[in-house]
Amino acid sequence: MAHKPSQLIWHNGHFVPWWEAKVHVLTHGLHYGSSVFEGIRAYATDKGAAIFRLRDHVERLFESARIHRMQIPYSQDDLFDACKQIIRVNRLTNGAYLRPIVFRGYGEYALAPSPQLPIEVAIAATEMGAYLGAEGLERGVDACISSWQRPAANTFPTMAKAGGNYLNSSQISMEAQRHGYQEGIALGTDGMLSEGGGENVFLVKKGVLYTPPTSAAILTGITRDTVMTLAQELGYEVRQQTMPREALYVCDEAFFTGTACEITPIRSIDGLTIGNGSRGPITHELQDLFFGLVKGKLADRFGWLDYVGGGEIEVEHDLHSALA
Ligand SMILES: Cc1ncc(COP(=O)(O)O)c(C=O)c1O
């Protein structure tokens, strides 16, 4: 999905105009995938924009950086504040998609870079609709099992949300779309279900929810955790369980979870219709609870919303024209 430029990007501690947030072509992260990043959503609520599970996303960003031995030159609180500011300064009152990224910068070709190689940090915020389409949220999407597998545990770390990992995700999604599906689901090297190109997967069978465990080479999604919490609150049993692909062939409902796709029903898998070929009742119930919560319509009993607040943000004088 194409994004519409906003006005300013936070880059290494400063706001810069959207088109001036640039890097050198020899940036380490560009060559070796040495970046870690997050995708975060903010929603419009009656009290202004609120960022969903911001602390958890910033924490995961720091964990990803630690796994790849990158020292982020800011504190978690600094980035927490910067995320709120970038929404306010761009006046994204209708909600936003935030993309914080940490990457090894310019200066060396070394695969084992010296501590002198800079670590850069940027945060962009744009408007964003439903990742797999607004219709997908209601009617569901067609998915297939990918011929690509998720990486084996000791190849590179799947727990880190790192740029390089997304070459695998891209192959999964590109292959699926080439064959007329909206998304692909990969198996692990053990042949068991893992996750979608950019989403975690759930299925429902006889009223119980199942999702592959952390050991299935998945990114441990924050939406996955949200859905497990909400499902349990609704009284459903949730099992993190290793499953073969055919578990999806015989389930009653299935859906993807992710910050971008939110909760998107899967209506068919490898050409086999799931349930009634549309959004299942438990998926619908979870969506209602999820959207009620993120949009501030239901009580924020888990402390998941961070309101960005109002008022003008001070910017340097030469940026006023970018904001005009
Ligand atoms: C590969 C992959 N799996 C799962 C997810 C879902 O994670 P989250 O719910 O934290 O966005 C994402 C999205 O970030 C992803 O890229």
Image: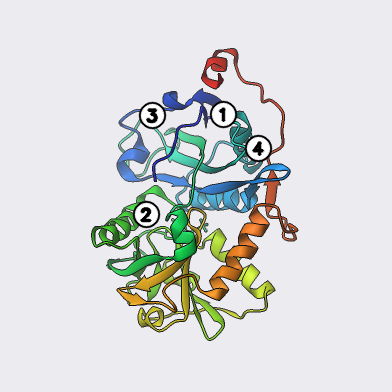
Q: Quadrant of the C terminus?
A: top right
| Residue depicted at x 36% and y 30% | 107
Give the residue number, with chain letter if any, for mark 4. Answer: 81
**From the Cβ of disc 2, is ligand 1 less than 8 Å away?**
yes
Query: Which is more N-terminal, label 4 or label 1?
Result: 1
**Is disc 3 in contact with disc 2, using a CB cutoff of under 8 Å?**
no
* Mark carried by residue 165: 2
At 45% across and 47% down in the image, what residue appears?
A: 36
* Residue located 44% across and 60% down the image: 136
Real-space Cα distance between discs 1 and 4? 11 Å
Distance from Cα at disc 3 to Cα at disc 1: 15 Å
- For the residues bearing labels 2 and 4, Cβ distance under 8 angstroms: no
Looking at the rendered structure, the secondary structure element under dot 2 is helix
Residue 116: which numbered mark, if any?
none
Of residues 178 and 14, the one drawn nearer to the viewer in this rendering: 178
- CA gap between label 2 and label 4 equals 27 Å
Label whose residue precedes the other's in the sequence (2 or 4): 4
Q: Residues within 10 Å of mark 3 (few under 14, many from 20)?
A: few
* Image coords of residue 211 (percent x, y): 49, 74
Judged left or right of residue 98, residue 51 is right
Residue at mark 3 to residue at mark 2: CA–CA distance: 21 Å
What amino acid is at disc 3? Val
Mark-to-mark CA distance, 2 and 1: 26 Å
- Tell me the amino acid under the disc marked 4: Asp
Task: Report crowding for label 2: few under 14, some 14 to 19, many 20 or more residues within 10 A (C-alpha).
Answer: many
Which residue is under mark 1? 13
Number of other residues with Cα within 10 Å of mark 4, as a class: few under 14, some 14 to 19, many 20 or more = few
> Which numbered disc, 3 or 1, marks the residue that appears first in the sequence?
1
Residue under the image location 52 percent in, 19 percent down:
322
**First in sequence: mark 3 or mark 2?**
3
